[in-house]
Amino acid sequence: MNRQKYTAALLLAAAFSVVHAEPQEASFQDQCALVGLMAQTAMGERLSGTGIGQTVEKMNERFMVVAKNDYSRSFIQGLTERVAQEIYHFPQSALNAVPKSDYAIFARDTGKAEYQLCMKALTGKTE
């Protein structure tokens, strides 16, 4: 993911932590967007060969910097671990079929799918 996408993720997380003292007060769309960005990041790292521990550390660094309180930090840390676990649960044999030239597209599509699944689970709608 490029710098602009990380900046957008950090701005989203900043708005999330500043406007909402507790994550459950954030809109479903904001929560699901955060899940989608995390899934995109985790898949990109997985495809690049990064281990799950390093991926969680990187995700925490990227998404934790804007957490303003202990509750937000705990929420984001738990979410990064859960999302990384989901991504690393995919069999490597299935990911071997993805050409290196398509890694960024596949990671983006994974994030989009996670966003849609989250929205469907929370609202019954995908948009």
Image: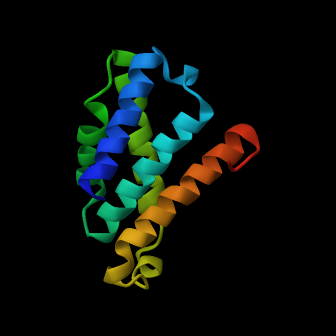
Please say if 25 is above or below 62: above
Q: What residue sits 33% from the left and 51% below the top?
A: 5
Q: What residue sits 48% from the left and 57% below the top?
A: 111
Residue 106 locus on image (x, y percent):
44, 71
Residue 72 locus on image (x, y percent):
39, 22
| Quadrant in the picture for residue 59 | top left
Q: Nearer the viewer, residue 37 or 7?
A: 7
Q: What residue sits 35% from the left and 34% below the top?
A: 11
Residue 122 locus on image (x, y percent):
68, 38
Q: Nearer the viewer, residue 46 or 120?
A: 120
Please say whether residue 8 is visible from this viewpoint. yes
Q: Is residue 17 left or right of residue 30?
A: left
Residue 76 locus on image (x, y percent):
39, 32
Please say whether residue 74 is visible from this viewpoint. no
Please say if 22 is above or below 54: above
Q: Is residue 32 left or right of residue 126?
A: left
**Number of marks drawn:** 0
- Where does the N terminus fall, quadrant-wise? bottom left
Q: Nearer the viewer, residue 53 or 40?
A: 40
Q: Nearer the viewer, residue 2 or 92?
A: 2
Q: What residue sits 42% from the left and 77% below the top?
A: 95
